[in-house]
């Protein structure tokens, strides 16, 4: 059974069919990338999987069960974590505090326990800290752990955003354009981390990304979309060489039409 199944999903915004009868499955342990030109429907698909939008048709199953009855705040508890293209961190909190927020779904202690600060709560707090420290080590964030987000460079914030999602200890990590705004060197680091997230942490990754170097370096399979429709599925190379994909990117259906750049 696939970890994530997108089954004939459609979503319209007024007259625009943002996602049009799209189906694909993500297998446990793989890195799966969604690519396509602007407006292809990639972000909308991400927002459907994170339950921000409801499809008008189709089903989305995680671990064999439909998640259409779940709300966005229940995703972390299910084992699905995501990053946002526009980085969603608490600016006036430290890196450590932001990562601890990610641990929210693991909190077992109740209100009375917290008031009394029982040994159970202290033990639980320690486990959260240990899990977060592991993520800090993994992403090489030691130098920033007590720094406020507001003062950090963009590239570091992107990494913290990934750390916040990893601190949830998800089974499925959704990465929304992890390389956008990053330098070539920073993008290479992201490639190493995505590889390690898969191999060392055993986390399945679904990624939206425009940078085809990153996509080619880390993805097991790639799905190309255009105008809300699935165009081609395969390895990065297969998808990049697919005539329908070339046509969608170049934006001409007539192969004799000259493209002026
Ligand atoms: N909230 C919305 N309201 C109305 N139309 C929307 C909304 N969100 C997306 N759309 C439209 O749906 C289509 C798909 O958009 P989407 O943002 O999913 O594409 P994308 O592939 O993520 O593009 P990009 O690479 O630019 O982020 C586009 O035509 C877009 O204008």
Image (cartoon, helix red, strand yellow):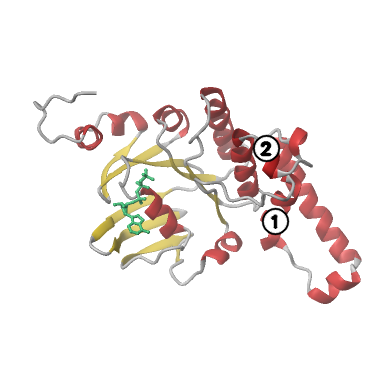
10 sits left or right of 153 in the view: left
Q: Is mark 2 within 8 Å of ligand 1?
A: no
Q: How many marks?
A: 2
193 sits left or right of 43 in the view: right
Find residue 45 and report its image quarter: bottom left
- Which one is in front in this view, the residue at disc 2 or the one at disc 1? 2
Q: Position of residue 230 (x, y in %)?
A: 27, 47
Find residue 19 and report its image quarter: bottom left
Badge 1: how crowded within 10 Å, few (<14), some, or many (20+)?
some
Q: Position of residue 79 (x, y in %)?
A: 58, 57
Give whichever of 169, 213 is nearer the camera. Answer: 213
Marks 2 and 1 in Cβ contact (< 8 Å)? no
Give whichever of 38, 25 is nearer the camera. Answer: 38
221 to 56, vertically: above or below: above
Which comes sooner in the sequence, label 2 or label 1?
A: 1
Please name the residue shown 57% across and 45% down the image.
203
Residue 1 visible somewhere in the drawing: no
- Residue carrying label 2: 152
Give SS at disc 2. loop
Give whichever of 156, 114 is nearer the camera. Answer: 156
Give whichever of 58, 64 is nearer the camera. Answer: 58
Q: Position of residue 148 (x, y in %)?
A: 73, 44
Residue 92 visible somewhere in the drawing: yes
Q: Position of residue 190 (x, y in %)?
A: 56, 32
- Residue carrying label 1: 101
Give SS at disc 1. helix
157 sits left or right of 207 in the view: right
């Amino acid at each position: 059974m696939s970890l994530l199944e997108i089954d004939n999903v459609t979503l319209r915004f007024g007259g625009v069919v943002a996602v049009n009868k799209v189906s694909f499955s993500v297998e446990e342990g793989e890195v799966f990338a969604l690519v396509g030109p602007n407006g292809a429907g990639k972000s909308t698909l991400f927002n459907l999987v994170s339950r921000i939008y409801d499809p008008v048709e189709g089903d989305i199953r995680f671990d064999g069960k439909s998640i259409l009855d779940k709300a966005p705040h229940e995703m972390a508890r299910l084992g699905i974590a995501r990053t946002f293209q526009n980085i969603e961190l608490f600016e006036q909190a430290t890196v450590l505090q932001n990562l601890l927020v990610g641990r929210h779904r693991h909190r077992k202690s109740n209100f009375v326990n917290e008031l009394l600060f029982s040994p159970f709560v202290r033990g639980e707090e320690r486990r959260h800290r240990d899990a977060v420290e592991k993520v800090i080590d993994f992403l090489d964030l030691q130098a920033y752990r007590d720094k406020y987000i507001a003062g950090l460079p963009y590239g570091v914030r992107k990494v913290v955003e990934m750390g916040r999602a990893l601190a949830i200890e998800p089974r499925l990590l959704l990465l929304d354009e992890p390389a956008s705004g990053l330098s070539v060197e920073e993008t290479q680091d992201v490639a190493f981390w995505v590889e390690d997230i898969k191999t060392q942490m055993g986390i399945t990754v679904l990624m939206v990304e425009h940078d085809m170097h990153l996509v080619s370096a880390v993805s097991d399979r790639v799905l190309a979309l255009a105008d809300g429709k699935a165009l081609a599925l395969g390895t990065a190379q297969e998808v990049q060489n697919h005539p329908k994909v070339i046509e969608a990117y170049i934006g001409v259906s007539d192969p004799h039409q000259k493209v002026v750049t």
